[in-house]
Image (spheres, helix red, strand yellow):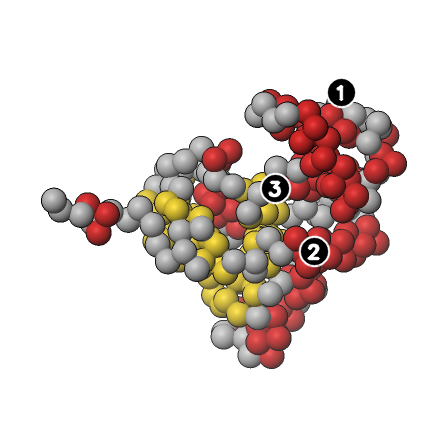
Amino acid sequence: MTDLSTFSPASTDSKYSVSVRDLTLSFGSLTVLGNLNLDIHDGEFLVLLGSSGCGKSTLLNCIAGLLEPTDGQIFINGRNVTWEEPKDRGIGMVFQSYALYPQMTVEKNLSFGLRVAGMPKEDIAKRVARAAAILQIEPLLQRKPAALSGGQRQRVAIGRALVRDVDVFLFDEPLSNLDAKLRSELRVEIKRLHQQLKNTMIYVTHDQIEALTLADRIAIMKSGVIQQLDDPVTIYNRPNNLFVAGFIGSPS
Ligand code: ADP
Ligand code: MG
């Protein structure tokens, strides 16, 4: 019998946590991403850096399954997830806007998805307690979102991804709505979270400082094309081209 698996792009090298293969995404006649390729290592903190409109969110949404690619494939842990539902991909997403349920307490916000998924109560309680401890939001569990600061809300939003025990975290400009002081505080926390959990994290930002301080590697994007993919020191010291040099050198 013919082994069909050799003909099917059902999997790729599983040493990568996330692989984007020849990804094209068009909105009507506007091609935002054209044949983009990107491999992200297991446990890596990868920052997608670029100015507004360059296609960062579009790429992240394709990985998350919120946008269907026009062409190309997405692999997570070697599995072709291109046509899988977002909830089946083993990813958790944190957006710029907190997207918390206003009528629910923090505890309910954290546990809601797990209850919907039918997880036993004791397991839910353990997951919520662990996430609350890691993010230091235990004293806030009985409050509603309206009674939280912006930074606290964003911690809860991260907590909602954390309780699901996902392999890959996707962050889309999670700190953009916060003031400078909170931004730098939460930056430190996100770094600590990564060191503790060792998950793969893909983090979108237009802020060079955020990228340089958080990333294992930075992918600098312009008009849907990755201009350079390197560690922060290399990007800073040896930019590939004038665009990268100018972008890294300019204030955000
Ligand atoms: P970024 O996150 O880097 O700011 P986006 O990925 O949101 O950029 O957008 C990339 C480009 O795609 C922009 O030109 C934007 O206007 C366009 N775009 C994004 N979403 C849509 C959509 N739903 N329909 C049409 N164009 C879109
Ligand atoms: Mg965006």
Q: Earlier in the sequence, mark 3 or mark 2?
A: 3
Binning the other alpha carbons within 10 Å of mark 2 as few (below 14), some (14 to 19) or many (20 upward) gives: few
Q: Earlier in the sequence, mark 1 or mark 3?
A: 1
Q: Which quadrant is the N terminus positioned in? A: top left
Location of residue 133 by image quarter = top right
Element at label 2:
helix
Judging depth in this view, the residue of 167 and 119 nearest the camera is 119
Q: Which quadrant is the C terminus positioned in? A: bottom right
Q: Which mark is residue 165?
A: 3
| Left or right: 176 in relation to 92 | right
* Residue at (73, 25) in percent of width and height: 108
| Left or right: 193 in relation to 12 | right
Binning the other alpha carbons within 10 Å of mark 3 as few (below 14), some (14 to 19) or many (20 upward) gives: some
What separation in Å lies between label 3 and label 2 (alpha carbons)? Answer: 13 Å
* Residue at (68, 46) in percent of width and height: 174
Does the numbered disc 3 mark a residue whose Cβ is under 8 Å from ligand 2? no
Residue 245 visible in rendering: no
Residue of label 2? 196
What separation in Å lies between label 1 and label 3 (alpha carbons)? Answer: 24 Å
Residue 18: x and y, percent? 46, 53
Residue of label 1? 103
Q: Which mark is residue 86?
A: none
Residue 69: x and y, percent? 38, 41
Q: Which amino acid is tagged 1?
A: Gln
Front: mark 2 or 1: 2
| Left or right: 92 in relation to 107 | left
Residue 127: x and y, percent? 69, 36
Q: Which amino acid is tagged 2?
A: Gln
Q: Which amino acid is tagged 3?
A: Asp
Front: mark 1 or 3: 3
For this orientation, the residue located farthest to the top is: 103
